[in-house]
Image (spheres, grey):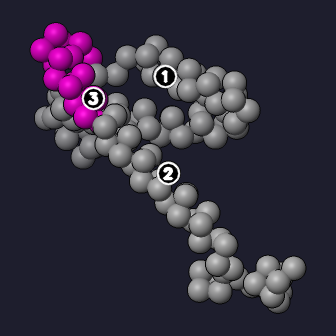
Amino acid sequence: MTDAEKKPENNCVTLATAPAWLQDYRAQIDALDDQIVALLHKRHGVIRAVAARKKEAGIPAILPDRVAQVIDRNAENAANIGMDDGLVRRLYTDIVATSCALEQALIAPILFKKRDRA
């Protein structure tokens, strides 16, 4: 084991004192995070298009059965690949809630703003 691979004294590691090999992993994580943000942005683009069509058709922004389907499907996909389905369920609950709020604001902006103030 080289000096760089030895455990730091008292396990006290900061960003500045972390071993060099850790930087490669950080770069991989940062690249994945960039992709996640780009995909969320793309998802919101689709949400905007759906909201416009729902508004034209008189369909409400929030369809509870679809909300449940999206969350359940992604949690199941996570479980199928050995990932923590609870984590994915929590993440998708937030993603879907944000998407529903965006749709609601686009479909009925005046009602949405009034409800926010209440």
Q: Position of residue 86 (x, y in %)?
A: 67, 36
- N-term mark: 2 or 3: 2
- Pick the quarter of the image with the N terminus: bottom right
Say above or below: 108 vs 53: below
Q: Which three-letter amino acid code belongs to the residue tagged 2?
A: Leu
- Label 2, on which residue? 32
- N-term mark: 1 or 3: 3
Q: Which three-letter amino acid code belongs to the residue tagged 3?
A: Val
Name the disc covering residue 46, or none.
3
Residue at the location (16% across, 23% down)? Answer: 52
Say above or below: 88 vs 3: above
Using residue 54 as the reference point, say whether residue 33 is left or right of it.
Answer: right
- N-term mark: 1 or 2: 2
Residues marked 1 and 3 touching at CB (< 8 Å): no
Q: CA distance from mark 2 to mark 3?
A: 21 Å
Is residue 38 covered in magenta? no
- Label 1, on which residue? 70
Q: Position of residue 39 (x, y in %)?
A: 38, 40
Q: Quadrant of residue 118?
A: top left
Q: CA distance from mark 1 to mark 2?
A: 22 Å
Q: Which three-letter amino acid code belongs to the residue tagged 1?
A: Val
Quick one: label 3, few (<14), some, or many (20+) residues within 10 Å? few
| Residue stretch in magenta | 44-60
Observer-side mark, 1 or 3, equals 3
Say above or below: 18 vs 110: below
Quick one: label 2, few (<14), some, or many (20+) residues within 10 Å? few
Q: Quadrant of residue 76?
A: top right
Q: Which of these two is toward me, 73 or 68? A: 73
Residue 56 visible in the shown view? yes
Using residue 54 as the reference point, say whether residue 71 is left or right of it.
Answer: right
